[in-house]
Amino acid sequence: MSPRVGPQDGRAPDPRTARTKARLRESLLAECAGRPLAEVGVSAVVRRAGVGRATFYLHYEDLTALAVDACADVVHAAVDALHAWQTGPAAAPPARPPAALAGFLAGAAGRAPLYRALLLPGGGGPLGERLHRELRERARAERAAAGAPHPELVASAVAAAFTGVLADWLHDTVPAGAADLAGHLWRLLLALHRAVPEA
């Protein structure tokens, strides 16, 4: 399930709520630094965060919802890393991957145990679904803005390929270092973009 969201009536979110959720996210990441998510309990998270269990359940349905929220930055970082080269909708992608992509992969490897609990082999799981959705939308919008053909089709393929390869790499079924994987992924994604020519 997704974390509960704030007011839908246009009001700014309560800063106290934002601070509480930030403390819970930080607490979970700290707990997961030393053990798998499956071994972390709500009690340990709220104790470290300095809030009560009732406060936790006011904002999150369970630890998985909190974990996905805590890992949302990895989704944004992945999307930004793939598009770090862009200066405008008509810019041509470089032959080599942007440095941000290898940097993102190296950072993801540092939290692989937590990400593996949320991003299953093949790209499934709650974090995989979120990553796929955001990558697909970004790729679709940018391809459409550039006037490239079949933006929905290509965006779906790009999102699926990146999410699946990242997941399998984090689960140690794709042997490669971060820099090498960045190069392989980049060439794969460029090929997908070029696979559907103009009609």
Image (spheres, rainbow, N blue to C red):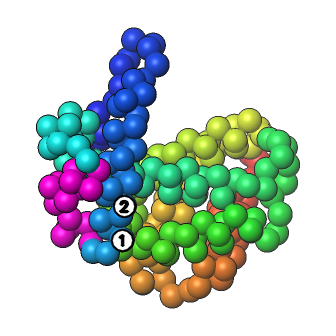
Look at 19% across and 48% down and name the residue there. 62
Q: Image quadrant of residue 124?
A: bottom left
Q: Is residue 61 magenta?
A: no
Residue that numbered label 1 is attached to: 33
The span shown in magenta is 36-49
Label 1 environment density (alpha carbons within 10 Å; few <14, some 14–19, many ≥20): some
User: What numbered label is drawn on residue 29?
Assistant: 2
- In the foreground, 80 or 151: 80
Amino acid bearing label 2: Leu
Q: Is residue 22 above or below residue 27?
A: above
Look at 45% across and 50% down and name the residue there. 72
Q: Is residue 181 above or below residue 76?
A: below
- Horizontally, residue 2 falls left or right of residue 62, namely right
Amino acid bearing label 1: Ala
Task: For the N terminus, give its image quadrant.
Answer: top left
* Contact? badges 1 and 2 (CB < 8 Å): yes
Look at 61% across and 43% down and name the residue there. 138
- Horizontally, residue 80 falls left or right of residue 61, namely right
